[in-house]
Amino acid sequence: MGPLTRRAVIPPGTTVFGPYTPAVQAGPFLFVSGQLPALPSGELLRGPIEDQTRLCLENIARIVAAAGGTLRDLVKVTIYLADMNDFGAVNAVYATFFDRDPPARACVEVRRLPKDARIEIEAVAYLASAG
């Protein structure tokens, strides 16, 4: 078995709020850091949780695409919510991105998120063509 290849994936326009990489590809796996509902300007989108959820997933899709994949390549997603009362609205939007065979998922309520965001989503993709 050869050495594990590892590379940072940093698409243009991706906002980071600390000392981390938007995604790291290790072999065929892509580990996408938690994505807040960040606009290209770096500002957080405020407003309905549906819009924030959509933006988080669009940001993840852009990062995965930069590594050569699509949302269909996601195998695990974790959603962090500041308020579990948003769960139903988040699920409604999430379902529009994954119409069949959605990835494994966890959703947890947390006390607080960076930048006082209401939602953060992280993901793991399996990029078969990289394996």
Image (cartoon, rainbow, N blue to C red):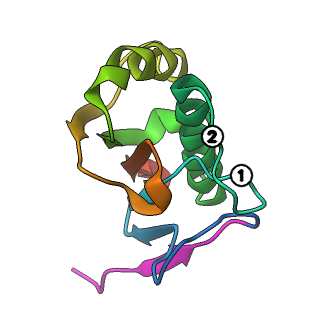
- Against 131, is 1 above or below? below
Q: Identify which residue is drawn at 64% across, 66% down.
A: 15
Specify whether 102 is left or right of 92: left
Residue 13 in view (yes/no)? yes
Q: Position of residue 109 (x, y in %)?
A: 23, 39
**Was residue 7 drawn as part of the magenta stretch in this picture?**
yes
Q: Quadrant of residue 6?
A: bottom left
Q: Identify which residue is drawn at 40% across, 80% down.
A: 5
Circle 1: residue type: Leu
| Residue designated by label 2 | 46
- Against 116, is 83 above or below? above
Specify whether 109 is left or right of 122: left
In terms of secondary structure, what is the magenta stretch mainly?
loop
Secondary structure beneath label 2: loop
Could you give the CA–CA distance between mark 2 and mark 1, rounded to whole angstroms?
10 Å
Asked whether 7 or 87 is in front, the reply is 87
Q: Which dot marks residue 125? A: none
Q: Position of residue 10 (x, y in %)?
A: 62, 71
The N terminus sits in image quarter = bottom left
Label located before the other in sequence (2 or 1): 1
Magenta span of residues: 1-11
Depth-wise, is mark 2 or mark 1 nearer the camera?
A: 2
| Residue designated by label 1 | 39
Specify whether 113 is left or right of 61: left
Specify whether 73 is left or right of 42: left
Q: Quadrant of residue 73?
A: top left
Circle 2: residue type: Arg
Q: Position of residue 59 (x, y in %)?
A: 61, 48
Secondary structure beneath label 1: loop
Residues packed near mark 1 inside 10 Å, few (<14), some (14 to 19) or many (20 plus): some
Q: Are marks 2 and 1 in contact (CB under 8 Å)?
A: no
